[in-house]
Amino acid sequence: MKVLCTTETSLNRPEARRWRERMKLLEPMGELVVVLPCSMRKPYSASKSHQVFTTATKGLQEAILTSPFGVCPRELEQTYPIQSYDVSTVGDWSREEIKLTGECLKEYVGDHEVVAHVAHGYLTVCQEYLPHATFTCHDGRATSAESMVNLKKEVKKYNKLKSHARQLHMLRSIARYQFNTVDADLLVPDDYRLRGRFDRRLMQGEEQIAVLHHNNGLYSLNIKGGTILSEIGVNWVEIDFDLKTNTLFAPGVVDAYPHIIPKDEVVIIRKGEVVGVGKAIMNGSEMKKGEKGVAVRVRHRLS
């Protein structure tokens, strides 16, 4: 589903606000962050400009600057809603756009060294909020031969990150974003394996934890993933009866994690034990107070 972000009011869309807030949970890898402009085409890596950029930046921590979402680490570029929004990539940036985007970028970057390969409005953001960055685009064209020579010269000073470490970081970053906690790292154990070409099955040994979907870049949980989520203490729904169908109605909910929102992955618990996992239809307070309606579409259950 496309997320239209064509006016300045898009800065206050729930999806944009949630994205910027959850970026505070993420941490860059390595010692360098390369800041790049966004592109009209999504995911960014499919665009002509980013295919040029990655000739120099592949293997380094990349952060794509974009309004109204603020910043998108490369590892989250295929995660909803960043993989499906429409926004103009040209024109002047408003003061509010510069402020919200700059604050998000500054907090994400932290104490890391920065190479900013940006122009126009993106350049204004970086100059104001990352004044100590190294700027490599001097002719106003990020893909020009001169700009790319400057970029390659700067990034050669830094070590590339190993592919397995980058993949682990990507999987855990997606989990942090989706479940809104740094403890979501536990969903991706050190000895994980991925199976599948498109929808990737996240495994530990022969046990499936979750599926990472290629169409939205988010996880759907299996029972083992639900057990881990229960131990973390988020997105739980408590019942007091034997779950025998794939639909959980609101009157059957005893209690629910208050920060659940519709379409969240949830774990269903009875007497402290995991009995199922599924997708929320209501938010947490609606589940708890509701007298009718579907609360959770159950995907897997034990009974």
Image (cartoon, rainbow, N blue to C red):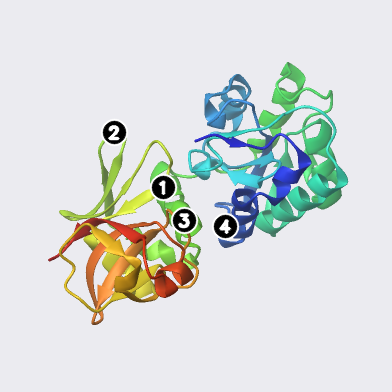
Q: Position of residue 186 (x, y in %)?
A: 37, 65
Q: Earlier in the sequence, mark 1 or mark 4?
A: 4
Mark 4 sits on what residue?
Answer: 27
- Direction left: furthest residue: 303
Nearer to the camera, 33 or 266: 266
Camera-nearest label, 3 or 2: 3
Q: Position of residue 182 (x, y in %)?
A: 49, 66
Mark 3 or mark 2, earlier in chain:
3
Q: How many marks?
A: 4
Q: Is residue 290 above or below residue 133?
A: below
Task: Give amino acid for label 4.
Answer: Glu
> What is the three-letter code of the residue carrying label 3?
Gln
As shown in the figure, which amino acid type bears the numbered disc 2?
Arg
Q: Which residue corresponds to mark 1?
A: 218
Q: Which mark is residue 197?
A: 2
Please state which amino acid type lies under the numbered disc 1. Answer: Leu
Q: Does residue 38 appear to the left or right of 269 in the view shown?
A: right
Tag 3, which secondary structure? helix
Q: Secondary structure at mark 2?
A: loop
Residue 141 lies, with reference to residue 270, above or below; the image says above
Tell me: 130 left or right of 22. Answer: right
3 and 2 marks in contact (CB < 8 Å): no
Question: CB atoms at circles 3 and 1 under 8 Å apart?
Answer: yes
Mark 3 vs 4: CB contact within 8 A: no
In the visual, does 161 lie left or right of 109?
Answer: left
